[in-house]
Image (cartoon, grey):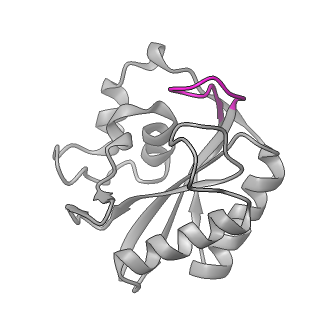
Amino acid sequence: MARVYVGMGSNMERVSNIRSGVAALRDSFGELSLSRVYDCKAVGFEGGDFFNLVAGFYSRRPVMELVEILQHIEAVHGRRRDGERLAPRPLDLDLLLYDDLIMQQDGVCLPRDEILEYAFVLCPLAEIAPQGVHPVVGRTFSQLWREFNHASQSLSPVDIGL
């Protein structure tokens, strides 16, 4: 079975969409490892603050099937894919890692570039997989988080009762 990590975010009805999104992931994939939820500013566009977290789980499903399930969960939550890429959204689910697979196919890039770019992805990933190794750069997520420019993107942990 593959160890899978998914980034989750919402800046519309954040508490209910994150709770419902986590429930949908559990229904689809079973037991989850969850990071804390972090409150952070929208990056790359003007919009409401986001709640973000990372979920980890094991799956036998192939990558593209996982992506289809994640997109279905987003759609059920009102996510539309016909607008701007960087825009407010009820629920955003991004496949970050699938074991140590490196691929770029049909719009899916693994490992996801955002791991190295955004605190709201790297911090929660390092929290639940500190000894996991980034398959491209070869350093652990905890090492990458220690080296990250924390001042550039602030995060605040929040408790929403997951």
Magenta residues, start to end: 39-49
Name the quadrant of the N terminus: bottom left
Question: Taking 42 as reference, is 14 above or below it?
Answer: below
Q: Is residue 162 visible?
A: no
Which residue sits at x=38%, y=48%? 130
Horizontal and vertical percent position of residue 75? 66, 66
Main SS type for the magenta part? Answer: loop
Horizontal and vertical percent position of residue 161? 81, 52
Which residue sits at x=64%, y=63%? 74
Question: Taking 11 as reference, is 40 above or below it?
Answer: above
- Number of marks in picture: 0
Name the quadrant of the C terminus: bottom right
In magenta segment, residue 36: no
In the rendered structure, the answer to whether residue 14 lies left or right of residue 69 reads right
Which residue sits at x=64%, y=69%? 73
Work out whether residue 110 or residue 143 is closer to the camera in this orientation and state it. 110
Q: Is residue 80 visible?
A: yes
Q: Residue furthest front?
A: 82
Horizontal and vertical percent position of residue 61? 41, 84
